[in-house]
Image: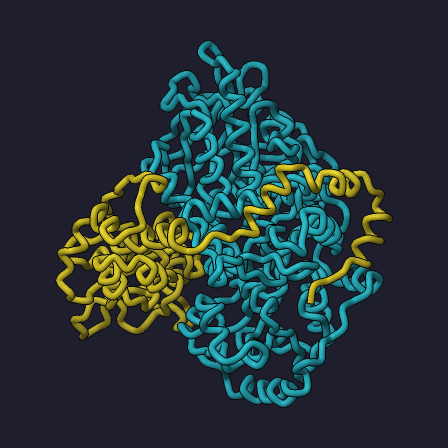
Amino acid sequence: MSYTSQLRELIKKVEQTREKRLGNEFPRMTPEEKEDVLSNYHPDHIEEQFRDAKIGPNKGDKFPHELCDVIEAHPSIDWEQFDTSKIDYDVDVLVVGGGGAGASASLLAHEAGADVLLTTKLRFGDANTVMAQGGIQAADKSNDSPATHYLDVIGGGHYSNVPELVRALVSDGPYVIDWLEDLGVMFDKEEDGTMQTRHGGGTSRKRMHSARDYTGAEIMRTLRDEVLCRDINVIEFSPVVELLLDKEGKAAGAVLYNFETQEYQVVKAKTVIITTGGLGRLHTQNFPTSNHYGATADGLVLAYRAGADLAFMNTVQYHPTGASYPEQIEGFLITEKVRGLGATPLNIDGEQFVYHLETRDVEASAIIRECAKGKGIKTPSGMQGVWLDSPMIEKIHGEGTIEKELPAMVRQFARFGVDITKDPILVYPTLHYQNGGILINDRCESSVDNLYVAGEASGGVHGRNRLMGNSLLDILVLGKRAGKNAAEKAKEIDNEKSELTLEHVKNFVNELEEQGIEKTKTSPILIPDYTKREEN
Amino acid sequence: MGKKYSVPSSLTIMKAFEYAGYTLLRGCGCRAGFCGACSTVYRLGGNHELKVGLACQTKVEDDMYLTQIPFYPYHKVQYDIEKLQSDGDQVVEIFPEITKCLGCNSCSNVCPQDLKVMKYISHAIRGEISKAADESFDCLMCGLCTSKCPANIVHYKVGLLCRRLHGKYIAPKAKHVEERINEIGNGEFEKELDELMNASKEELADRYNNREIEK
């Protein structure tokens, strides 16, 4: 579906102002202006979209309604009848989740000598990691430093980030790039090997490393290949539906559910690593999402029932540029690299209204504000959006740049008849990232003994807002740390005689009943239900 | 499926499945054309040609008769990347079947990414690892090429090996990364990071708002 004649008319206004905008940089917002647009337009600030958690370690904390719904649901297994004594797998380290954090945790745990089992709900590697397009940050150039990176991360996160986690992120960053290079990841480089790096929103140095706009896919397929080249047991289509603890309340295994045979299996493990990703598919505040199908907050549910603390769950990241046209790709991510290359957001009159590389929360809020002012563009399906002037990239960097730097984007739009090298893109914020998660320390330990967490399921490193390229970095920095630490810890544990229990689930159900929460819903939900959504 | 459904013409195959009431457990991942999990085979009424596409990226058409295929089975060759060579024979040694390529181009014809699959296999046969790496770069590893190959080649795995060999052995190393690692290892940034970790929110905000931004 190419642009309609009405939209074509509006595109002319964009074209008319293009020459004038070229070379005229729109001013960045002052700290006060940022505060103003965030508090008035960011979805995190709409109080009625949140409620107090009724039970569990974070009782009384504000969570999005959609998260409360899965946290305050009943377990999906019949815990009273469930036999935990019949062990199907007995391993040192159990990794739950098959994205970038799970793969890197498995590799490091394996390297440390552990017997590793990785289990995942979908196919190994089909996770948010493959969808990360734009890049991975790391402070490895001479004009940059871990401290400069630290300041960008903590400023972007509004000074709420857990400092020790930020330090881990920026200090391990260059090691991660080196590790990936050594595994054979094809980064965009100059002929002498120098990494091609660009800005992302909120970065003070060009430290975004990329592999065209398939950065996450390139990293994921390499890590997956490496896992498959080693003796790491991988089980696909088998989500974890409950964690198992030992008598002392320490993590000691999990219950797997075979999607196809509908059978349960018991895994006994010395340590467990949760790398299940975030909550995008819960569609908080009814936003479309850029997330993969499996992002239904499962890890949060499991860990919360086992007693782990969550952090920053009252903040969700809405990526400023999700596609709002054509209809088939509504909510899909338009990578921030498009703005990094110089594409700017414009209103219905073809005027810029915000600097194009503000942090994501500020940029998204400014777009929501512009549409609220009536300066947005209505799409035929009833969505709204603003223009992202992609052809500007060719004006700045020369013809052919888009094809070379953004092949995935070009292809995605071309499939539906839109040529982004010639026409601008219609965009509106899309639910992109869970800023919070299960609280960890810099060893990736949660508040439950022997339970480790890495990647988007963990919380604290990004504070209340994550910068582009720090997620691919965090899944690898923390994934590696989690794998290494969980394997080292496993060596100290003798679990031969320990018994696996679901006592914590019983206690959780008791709490639910005390709060009068009836068994109308179960969780983790594993698969989002779109059959009902279509009927609505 | 064996049933007829009428769905809105704007839907992709994936959304049409859901519209018709199906919940997807397999053949579904990122839903955005990156993970390659949703390979679908279809025919259009009156047309003999078997077509393929990704369910999340292909729009429904009238008289579409379709099925999703499970991920195509492949033989996973295990190797230790540390012990490989980046010379001409390495890829053939690991995937000897590539030399049996018949040149039928079926692989390229089914690629949902429009890659020149046969071309990169030819590069691999000739030991042109970097060319094969570059040509195969946009591969989603959906496996459709392999489903069609009369020579039983697992093209997407060949491309992956070439990319890893190029990335690890042929592309020049980034010297600045190595230098930075040495600096971090020597503790050169510890003091400044200590200061930042102990700074008050006001000090941090002051430094952040006045930081120098590279042009």
Q: Nearer the viewer, residue A417 or A506?
A: A417
Location of residue A392 in the rendering, given as x and y in whole percent from the top left corner: 58, 79
* Residue in the image at 47% along x and 46% along y: A180
**The chain drawn cyan is chain what?**
A
Tell me: residue A213, above or below residue A87.
below
Tag count: 0
> Colour mode?
by chain
Instruction: Judge by depth and name the residue closer to the eye, B192 or A30.
Output: B192
Instruction: Evaluate whether residue A531 shows in this view.
Output: no
Q: Which quarter shows the C terminus of chain B? A: bottom right
On the rendered structure, is A12 left or right of B73?
right
In this rendering, is residue B166 above or below A489? below
Q: Colour of chain B?
A: yellow
Residue at the top extreme of this rendering: A497
**Residue drawn at 35 percent across, 49 percent down:** B26
Q: What is the quadrant of residue A425 in the picture?
A: bottom right
Left or right: residue A140 compared with residue B80: right
Is residue B25 visible in the rendered image? The answer is yes
Residue at the image point whose x is 47% and y is 30% from the top: A109
